[in-house]
Image: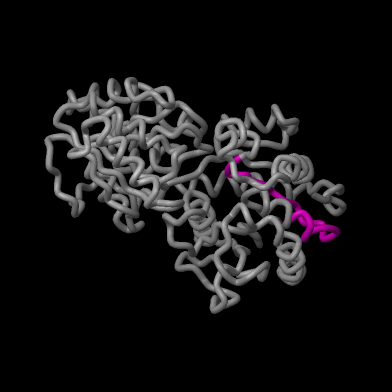
């Protein structure tokens, strides 16, 4: 199958940990390369964000990345890109006309908007994955939501115009149906994990342990990730250090805020900042922990809990978004309410007090990832969606518009 992927801001070639580089970049890269390894032709279209980038780059896994001109050839914050999406769509269309894809899969709402403009009258079916919904972001972030004003209305138009919508979690599926999506045109296909990369074999991380127990968090350093709640939870955990990994956003300001919270809570000596963790070091970073803690207030999917489970490390996670699907409460880890340092401390303490429980949860987590979240399995489920559309493409698709 000849497959086009559109990911306007999240390049599969990007270095992770930046303000707008995270789970979507990993998802697009891993899905594209897995499909390519299965014998399919895959081309990923992303915005040119540096002047000297070549037009085409072949990824090590075999998928092709094409840089599409739209706006200045430099880094532009994600929330400032919508003004360039009509230009992106115009230039994307030239590529799509030549490529003659069997299906085009758009990632994120702006990619969906541009893709639907670009495929107009080409008769190519479009699959949409939002990765995050503006309605949920607005609900949970309120005035802190910096999305463009057009986002909610555009998302609704994309949801209705796309031939099929892939949700990454049950929570997102429910939100899409609530917004009016036809349930017959929506399916949950989650993110995946590279089990070969995130294996369960022990290895040392280069930050020496100073106390008997270690918990870690790994995410972009932004307030909604709930790291402050983990810092506060440390008051209820004896002989335990917290290692915070991550960058992105205004890292310095958030790190200073967290450091002040640690001082206020009287735990500053037990909180350590590891900075942005290079991708190749993430498995060792996670395996250095007795428990991985992920307590965001809002999280569309959340890849770190899956990565920790692949490393056979138990997880304490807030019961939001995709974390409700991936972490099985009382089986692979514990769920806690968001913004609840007390509950977080209680759950972590229960795991730290029992090496056997930690081992059991870790092994169950590893088996869960093996059974449900390998990229081969995710790619096959995505292919099933593509195949259903190409076998019986709806005639209306040639007249779609976002």
- Residue 140 in the image: state x and y as whole percent: 56, 31
* Residue 117 counted in the magenta span: yes
**Residue at the (50%, 58%) spot, across then down:** 29
347, 202: nearer the viewer: 347
**Residue at the (14%, 44%) spot, across then down:** 209
**Residue at the (66%, 71%) spot, across then down:** 69
- Relative vertical location of residue 375 with respect to residue 358 in this rendering, above or below: below
Tell me the quarter of the picture where residue 39 sits. bottom right
- Relative vertical location of residue 333 with respect to residue 256 in this rendering, above or below: above
- Residue 37 in the image: state x and y as whole percent: 50, 61
- Residue 163 seen from this side: no
137, 312: nearer the viewer: 137
- Residue 389 seen from this side: yes
- Residue 286 in the image: state x and y as whole percent: 28, 45
Left or right: residue 320 compared with residue 104: left
Left or right: residue 377 compared with residue 394: left
The span picked out in magenta is 115-132
Quarter of the image containing the N terminus? bottom right
**Residue at the (78%, 47%) spot, across then down:** 392
* Residue 233 counted in the magenta span: no
- Relative vertical location of residue 55 with respect to residue 238 in this rendering, above or below: below
134, 7: nearer the viewer: 134
């Amino acid at each position: 199958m000849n497959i086009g992927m559109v990911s306007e801001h999240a390049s599969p070639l990007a270095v992770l940990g930046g303000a707008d580089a995270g789970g979507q970049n990993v998802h697009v890269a891993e899905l594209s390369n897995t499909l390519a390894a299965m014998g399919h032709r895959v081309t990923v279209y992303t915005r040119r964000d540096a002047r000297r980038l070549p037009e085409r780059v072949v990824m090590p896994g075999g998928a092709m990345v094409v840089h599409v001109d739209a706006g200045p050839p430099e880094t532009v914050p994600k929330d400032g890109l919508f003004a360039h999406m009509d230009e992106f769509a115009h230039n994307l269309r030239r590529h799509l006309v030549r490529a003659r894809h069997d299906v085009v899969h758009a990632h994120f709402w702006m990619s969906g908007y541009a893709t639907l403009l670009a495929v107009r009258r080409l008769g190519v079916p479009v699959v949409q994955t939002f990765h995050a919904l503006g309605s949920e972001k607005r609900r949970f972030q309120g005035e802190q939501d910096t999305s463009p004003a057009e986002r909610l209305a555009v998302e609704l138009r994309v949801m209705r115009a796309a031939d099929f919508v892939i949700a990454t979690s049950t929570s997102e599926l429910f939100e899409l149906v609530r917004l009016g999506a036809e349930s017959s045109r929506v399916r949950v296909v989650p993110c995946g994990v590279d089990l070969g990369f995130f294996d369960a074999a022990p290895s040392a991380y280069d930050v020496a342990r100073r106390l008997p127990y270690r918990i870690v968090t790994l995410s972009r350093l932004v307030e909604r990730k709930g790291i402050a709640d983990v810092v506060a939870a440390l008051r209820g955990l004896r002989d335990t250090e917290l290692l915070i990994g991550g960058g992105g956003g205004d890292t310095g300001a958030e790190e200073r805020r967290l450091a002040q919270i640690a001082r206020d809570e009287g735990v500053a000596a037990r909180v350590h900042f590891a900075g942005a963790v290079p991708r190749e070091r993430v498995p060792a970073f996670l395996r250095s922990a007795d428990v991985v803690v992920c307590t965001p207030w809002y999280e569309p999917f959340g890849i770190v809990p899956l990565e920790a489970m692949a490393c056979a490390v138990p997880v304490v996670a807030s019961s939001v978004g995709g974390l409700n699907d991936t972490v099985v409460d009382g089986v692979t880890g514990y769920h806690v309410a968001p913004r609840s340092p007390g509950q977080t401390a209680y759950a972590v303490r229960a795991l730290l007090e029992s090496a056997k429980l930690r081992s059991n949860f870790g092994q169950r987590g590893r088996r869960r990832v093996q059974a449900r979240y390998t990229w081969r399995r995710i790619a096959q489920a995505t292919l099933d969606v593509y195949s259903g559309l190409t076998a019986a493409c709806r005639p209306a698709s040639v007249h779609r518009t976002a």
